[in-house]
Amino acid sequence: MIALWLTLATANAESLRATLALEDDGSVRVVRAERVDDVVPSLPGELAVLGADGAVLATVALPPFATTRDIPFPEGGGAAGYAPTRFLRVILPWPDGATDLRVRGQRAHPFTASRMAPAPSDAEAVLANGPSARRLDLVFLGDGFTTDDRPKFDARVDSIVDHLLTIGPYTEYSGLINVWKVFTPSTSSGVDEEFATDTHVTPFECAYFCDPAIERLICCDEAKVVDFVDGHAPFADGIMVLVNSDKYGGAGGFTYGTSYTGDTQFVQVAAHELGHSLFGLWDEYSYGYSTPAPTTPADYLSPNCVSHNVADAWPAWTGEAVTSADPANPGAADQVERYEGCSFDDWDRPTSDSCMMNTLQDQYCPVCRETIVTKLYAALGGEMIVSQSPDPANRVVLADGESQTFKVKSLGPEQGVDVVWSVDGREVGTGAEFVVEGCDDLDGELLASVVDPTAWVRSDPQDVLSDSVAWTVKTKCAGCGCATNDAPPTAWLGALGLLVWRRRKS
């Protein structure tokens, strides 16, 4: 069986993430399908989204089935090899009216299941900030840990999470993330030194040398990893498998990541690999060769690497000053430009040496950081606002002497979000609460707009950093206005006391 892990997304807030299995005979079996929210471009290719009448609504090109895995080296640079797996994560639109998928001529009709909010009994929360449907969920697994090794597994998970929370934007946006761990004991302690051997009996069969030429590359039996997560933590947005070994190694891909658990550098290796698995970031070091096939801008999609064939690269950030955190060159001046070598020799990276996707260090470049923030918000399902009162479905009618307090609560960064209130397009105030009096002259729409004003995002084409809610409001005092000492009777807004809201994380 060849399995495809597909994230099917749309700009229409009607999205689907599916686990598909492409059988040996070429048929397609839908294993799981659930609603998610994301926005991606439509690209030509072999995987088609069909309407009820069979019309093709969107297509996407499937990457090669030979999956690339990579590992950064502590001395700088890194290597990539081809792992013996056939799992792919593909993102494509799921437009209104979509009903079926077609993969290489095989047609499948996905079922839709509600995304699991609570964790199953064997998934333990490490960082719990809300329902999985409204958070980005990271799941840690362990391989090569016996029951007696459980304390080591727990400690390593805690060390990685603690390390991540010292790095921006994880620190500022920790409230948008859930972290889980699932412990599965191994029969023997440790993992195999070579992928071709079978010395250790472990649940995910992780081993070094998963590319025969790269000793430090650690891969697992991907079918076992994905099947386990489907059964025990189907809400997972990212998977990290920790191996019980002190030998430096790991691997990053777009289905799961791996890391050794030895000296202190394992936390940096895990953070680097999660950049791949959680956010689709590419390596900003070169593997030492050019793109295997001729490329056009649509052949590969990378948020932080750009082909020589592409004229524009991160224009919103070009020239931005950066300070390197590379231990080999700490504190050095750097800036966002185009620097040759980003996964491939014929691709460019944003900074010279100021990103953990390039060298083992504790910061992201501005381009990667922006990608992470927007993807964290995308995991909210397009809804920053978590509660509002009164119920927007009910029209609010106020007589003279009556008043109504309108409230919103929103997810966002540690320092809070901005809330702006407007009436029929005219800004009337800011803050978490807004009071309307019955003596105000109002008959129309009261809108609360929420936005994250972070300087870390300069391009948000899908508006994932904003949200709004509206009420229909009418006051019965037609044109009389509230009496105040500092405003004319018609200036009904002058009587409203406004509080600027900086919401702490939920």
Image (cartoon, rainbow, N blue to C red):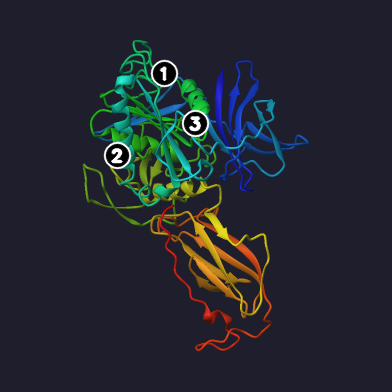
The Cα–Cα distance between marks 1 and 2, rounded to whole angstroms, is: 31 Å
Frontmost of labels 1 and 2 is 1
Q: Image check: 56 left or right of 403?
A: right
Q: Is residue 343 visible?
A: no
Q: Earlier in the sequence, mark 1 or mark 2?
A: 1
* Residue type at numbered disc 3: Pro
* Residue type at numbered disc 2: Thr
Instruction: Assess disc 3: are there few (<14), some (14-19) or many (≥20) residues with their C-alpha within 10 Å of its C-alpha.
Output: few
Q: Earlier in the sequence, mark 1 or mark 3?
A: 3
> In what quadrant of the picture does the N terminus appear?
top right
Residue position marked by numbered label 2 in the rendering: 359
Could you say which disc has been placed on residue 203 in the image? 1
Residue 212, placed above or below residue 339: above
* Residue type at numbered disc 1: Pro
Residue position marked by numbered label 3 in the rendering: 120
The Cα–Cα distance between marks 1 and 3, rounded to whole angstroms, is: 19 Å
Q: Nearer the viewer, residue 20 or 450?
A: 450
* SS label for mark 2: loop
Instruction: Assess disc 2: are there few (<14), some (14-19) or many (≥20) residues with their C-alpha within 10 Å of its C-alpha.
Output: many
**Residue displayed at 36% across by 52% down:** 336
Find residue 142 and report its horizontal and vertical position in percent. 37, 25
